[in-house]
């Protein structure tokens, strides 16, 4: 070892050694990085990286050797035979390619170390071929022990370099591979140089060296540095491209492509971090599930492009309304999740929800039209309602579902029991899909009566679900499920068709009223579908009344007006249902040509107790009279309510006072009795007993 060190310190010009060391380090680091690319590539790309790795490794090893040889101090002239010198360069590039190729062919076998051994032995072969080109006026004697040692060192460190780069234990192993390659080059070269002893003597005069050492060194090192710089630049470009691709994939994996907001995966990670960081026992993390209302109607009415534009706009609005460390993500088509850490009072979470709700409702200016939305927002708190992201998301979503059942634009906090309710709704949602085909949906009819004569003028068709195991299920339970799942279209078509079929068999003086859900109103083919049903059932269009609610009209008034115009062109009557419960009822009366107004039951039931309700009903009747629009009052249950409406001039009513919703057979009996009553009054019935029964006397 001391002999080798003495060879370096005494027998070499340290300036040349330093330059050789620089080339050796740069080349080794880049070679191992390139070889790593070889292992990760396939096909022609692997061959290209193999060529570049071999070019860099070979040129670096050869330049290190040649620089050190130029710095080898001898007391006489020396020269390098050009053919053998170039052959040594070709040999080391070829052996490097062979070693890299073999080591890269496997993931775990001993071919890795065998490839490294070939690589290290290639360094030795290059060295001794280069030494054969080293000509001096004397005799070179070789120490076989140092020769063997140098070959063993080159092979061993070459195998170690491949072992570290191919079998990494830590992220520092790639640097260990570069160090091993440096040792393979340096230990092999200087041990090999220690093996020689030059004995001056008489021999053929050497051909003079064409170029000075300094010029040769500059040329060789310059070319090698150019190679390293070129290949290194290509490697850096590839790394940058890979990083950009990785960043793009990372963004695609964690962000919603449409809105640019974080997605569900990102939201789960963020919530995990918030929960882990929430070390204050009195602080909570609020999780909000936001379910948009009417978004499906926007898609149905205006198309997917408008719906996408609305979501992008809404994403920006929600992001702008965040404060401090608040967070929001889009987790599905029309669902968002928001989070707020460091919540110390439940009212803070509610205020956060209200702020986001105001950003949601709009109106939003999209494609030259104003679009308004609603939202059902559910709130879950950690640790109160759970400490796992999935549990908190699920419970916030359950609260949002509950909020939607309470009405439009509601905010609801999670409470115990919602999990069971959700399971029940899920079961009902599955069963509802087969309810239509299984004839489980039955149409009930509630009579509508003349206020003065009390005669029946028509019936409203109301759907009931006769579940095979649960019995009769209220529309208030299954209609919201149908609206969320899209089954409302099938149910609506079924009710319309069956009601028209039943009404076609009634006496011509009776009309039938059918409700149309907001989502049905967004379908452009609704007038055509109604025309088809009328033609199929033979019902006179003037006997069909379509009832529309305010929520189905305000989302897209131009389309709603076009649909209403199409229905009226068929001769169908169009009524505004639940008048007075919305904030734009008067505006709708101004913009839409309704044939009837139905006053909501909430006003009728309190006309005797609340002067405000009585005043609203009077005002509605005055407005309708001035617009020449008939009125029907819903929810009439007492004679007192009927008397009030009769005195105020309301022409028709509907409610439990005259009959609850009933099956078709019961409605037919009621119509028969009503017909007998009319016949008795007209004197058509001569039998006195039958007349008394018909008139109720």
Image (cartoon, rainbow, N blue to C red):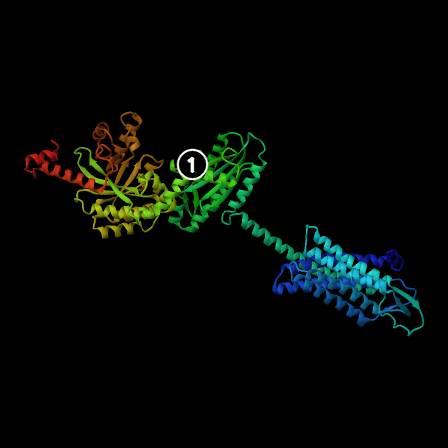
In the image: residue 172, left or right of residue 310? right
Q: Which quadrant is the N terminus positioned in?
A: bottom right
> What is the quadrant of residue 602 in the picture?
top left
Name the secondary structure under disc 1. helix
Residue 612 in sight in this render: yes
In the image: residue 368, left or right of residue 438? right
| 661, 302: nearer the viewer | 661
* Residue 343 coordinates in the image, percent (x, y): 53, 32
> What is the quadrant of residue 40 in the picture?
bottom right
How many other residues sit within 10 Å of disc 1, few (<14), some (14-19) or many (≥20)? some
* Residue 39 coordinates in the image, percent (x, y): 65, 59
* Residue 85 coordinates in the image, percent (x, y): 80, 69
In the image: residue 375, left or right of residue 130? left
The total number of labels drawn is 1
- Whether residue 130 is situated above or below residue 304 in the rendered picture: below
The residue indicated by pointer 1 is: 418
Q: Which quadrant is the C terminus positioned in?
A: top left
| 692, 335: nearer the viewer | 692
| 649, 663: nearer the viewer | 663
Residue 555 in sight in this render: no
* Residue 200 coordinates in the image, percent (x, y): 93, 68
**Residue for point 24% across, 33% down:** 656
């Amino acid at each position: 070892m001391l002999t080798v060190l003495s060879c370096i310190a005494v027998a070499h010009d340290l300036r040349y050694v330093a330059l050789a060391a620089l080339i050796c380090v740069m080349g080794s680091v880049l070679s191992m990085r390139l070889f790593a690319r070889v292992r990760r590539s396939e096909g022609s790309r692997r061959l290209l990286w193999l060529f570049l790795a071999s070019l860099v490794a070979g040129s670096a090893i050869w330049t290190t050797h040649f620089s050190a040889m130029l710095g080898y101090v001898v007391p006489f002239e020396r020269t390098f035979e050009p053919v053998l010198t170039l052959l040594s360069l070709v040999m080391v590039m070829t052996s490097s390619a062979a070693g890299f190729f073999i080591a890269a062919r496997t993931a775990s076998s001993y071919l890795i170390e065998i490839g490294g051994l070939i690589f290290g032995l290639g360094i030795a072969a290059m060295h001794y071929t280069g030494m054969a080109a080293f000509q001096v006026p004397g005799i070179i004697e070789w120490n076989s022990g140092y020769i063997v040692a140098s070959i063993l060192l080159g092979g061993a460190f070459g195998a170690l370099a491949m072992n570290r780069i191919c079998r990494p234990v830590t992220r520092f192993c790639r640097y260990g591979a570069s160090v091993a390659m440096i040792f393979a080059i340096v230990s092999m070269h200087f041990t090999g140089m220690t093996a020689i002893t030059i004995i001056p003597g008489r021999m053929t005069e050497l051909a003079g060296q064409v170029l000075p050492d300094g010029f040769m060194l500059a040329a060789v090192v310059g070319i090698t540095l150019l190679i390293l710089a070129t290949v290194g630049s290509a490697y850096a470009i590839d790394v940058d491209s890979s990083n950009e691709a990785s960043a793009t994939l990372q963004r695609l994996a964690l962000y919603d492509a449409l809105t640019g907001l974080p997605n569900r995966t990102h939201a789960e990670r963020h919530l995990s971090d918030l929960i882990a960081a929430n070390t204050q026992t009195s602080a909570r993390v609020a999780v909000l599930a936001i379910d948009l209302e009417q978004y499906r109607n926007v898609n149905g009415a205006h198309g997917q492009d408008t719906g996408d534009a609305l979501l992008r706009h809404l994403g920006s609005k929600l992001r702008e309304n965040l404060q401090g460390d608040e967070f929001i993500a889009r987790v599905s088509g029309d669902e968002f999740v928001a989070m707020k850490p460091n919540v110390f009072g439940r009212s803070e979470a509610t205020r956060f929800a209200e702020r986001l709700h105001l950003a949601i409702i709009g109106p939003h200016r999209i494609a030259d039209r104003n679009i308004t939305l609603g939202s059902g927002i559910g709130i879950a708190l950690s640790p109160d309602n759970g400490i796992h992201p999935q549990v908190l998301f699920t419970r916030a979503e359950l609260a949002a579902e509950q909020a939607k059942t309470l009405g439009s634009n509601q905010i609801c906090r999670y409470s115990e029991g919602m999990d069971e309710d959700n399971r029940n709704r899920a079961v009902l949602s599955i069963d509802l899909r087969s309810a239509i085909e299984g004839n489980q949906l039955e149409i009930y009819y509630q009579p509508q009566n003349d206020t003065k004569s009390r005669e029946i003028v028509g019936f409203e068709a109301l759907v009931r679900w006769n579940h095979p195991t649960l019995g009769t299920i209220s529309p208030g339970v299954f209609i919201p499920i149908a609206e969320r799942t899209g089954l409302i279209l099938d149910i609506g078509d079924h009710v319309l068709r069956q009601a028209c079929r039943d009404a076609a068999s009634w006496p011509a003086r009776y009309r039938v009223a059918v409700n149309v859900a907001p989502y049905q109103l967004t379908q452009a083919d609704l007038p055509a579908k109604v025309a088809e049903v009328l033609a199929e059932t033979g019902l006179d269009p003037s006997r069909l009344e379509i009832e529309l609610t305010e929520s189905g009209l305000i989302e897209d008034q131009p389309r709603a007006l076009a649909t209403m115009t199409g229905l009226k062109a068929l001769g169908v009557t169009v009524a505004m249902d639940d008048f007075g419960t919305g904030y734009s009822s008067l505006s709708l009366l101004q913009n839409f040509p309704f044939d009837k107004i139905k006053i909501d039951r909430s006003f009728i039931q309190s006309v005797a107790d609340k002067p405000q309700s009585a005043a609203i009903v009077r005002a509605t009747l005055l407005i309708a009279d001035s617009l020449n629009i008939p009125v029907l009052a819903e929810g009439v249950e007492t004679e007192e309510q009927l008397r009030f409406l009769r005195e105020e001039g309301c022409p028709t009513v509907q409610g439990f006072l005259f009959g609850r919703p009933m099956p078709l057979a019961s409605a037919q009996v009621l119509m028969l009795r009503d017909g007998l009553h009319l016949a008795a009054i007209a004197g058509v019935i001569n039998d006195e007993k039958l007349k008394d029964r018909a008139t109720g006397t």
